[in-house]
Image (cartoon, rainbow, N blue to C red):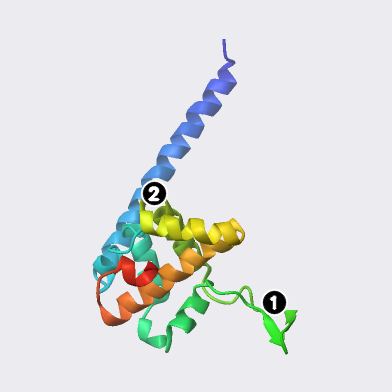
């Protein structure tokens, strides 16, 4: 027989959980509404691993894609590339690892996880990369490719082409 205090603690925890779930649904609805007004929202959802929430997050965090002159600048802003200083082939440090947008980094890592899980072409690319390097490096490589694809999708307003990105 459970103590009455334990029962009360569980009931109050469930009430808090239900309140938080309602707030999460409200925030998700706001993100969907804000994202749907953006021109690339539907196009981003054509990317493997990107759904309505990640598409809205990417659009709102990236802002105007024209502010990035090249795809490399966008990938760097998304924290999808390494940050190291080389001098004559020797490594001199790895500064500026916190530069960029941490939410875009998170979004592309999440997209990479889903893409690897549900897309056979991306999964085979990941497995080939993972066989040669560390699994986190392979995951970051998939996220980098997805970030590059999203840059071109937003810049040129074209749908995702899987074989062009991972062919």
Tag count in the figure? 2
Mark seen at residue 23: 2
Give the foreground label among 2 and 1: 1
Q: For numbered disc 1, what is the local secondary structure?
A: loop
Q: Residue at image x 48%, y 83%?
A: 73
Question: What x and y, as percent, mark residue 147?
Answer: 43, 71
Q: Nearer the viewer, residue 86 or 41?
A: 86
Of callouts 2 and 1, which one flags the residue occurring earlier in the amino acid sequence?
2
Q: For numbered disc 2, what is the local secondary structure?
A: helix
Mark seen at residue 107: none
Say if residue 103 shows up in the picture.
no
Q: Is residue 65 left or right of residue 90?
A: left
Say if residue 107 shows up in the picture.
yes
Q: Residue at image x 43%, y 56%?
A: 124
Q: Report which residue position mark 1 lands on.
A: 94
Question: What x and y, as percent, mark residue 127?
Answer: 50, 55
Asked if residue 89 is positioned above or below residue 133 in the image, the reply reads below
Q: Nearer the viewer, residue 34 or 130?
A: 130
Q: Residue at image x 58%, y 63%?
A: 137
Location of the N terminus by quadrant is: top right
Label 2 environment density (alpha carbons within 10 Å; few <14, some 14–19, many ≥20)? few
Question: What x and y, as percent, mark residue 84?
Answer: 66, 79
Q: Does the CB distance between marks 2 and 1 fall below 8 Å?
A: no
């Amino acid at each position: 027989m459970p103590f009455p205090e334990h029962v009360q603690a569980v009931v109050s925890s469930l009430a808090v959980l239900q309140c938080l779930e309602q707030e999460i649904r409200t925030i998700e609805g706001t993100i969907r509404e804000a994202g749907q007004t953006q021109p690339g929202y539907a196009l981003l959802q054509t990317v493997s691993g990107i759904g309505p929430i990640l598409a809205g997050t990417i659009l709102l965090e990236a802002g105007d894609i024209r502010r990035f002159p090249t795809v490399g600048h966008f990938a760097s802003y998304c924290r999808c590339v390494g940050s190291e200083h080389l001098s004559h082939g020797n490594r001199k440090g790895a500064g500026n690892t916190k530069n960029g947008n941490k939410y875009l980094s998170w979004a592309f890592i999440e997209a990479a996880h889903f893409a690897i899980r549900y897309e056979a072409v991306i999964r085979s690319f990941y497995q080939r990369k993972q066989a040669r390097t560390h699994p986190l490096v392979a995951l970051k490589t998939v996220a980098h490719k997805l970030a590059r694809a999203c840059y071109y999708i937003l810049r040129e307003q074209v749908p995702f082409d899987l074989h062009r990105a991972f062919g």
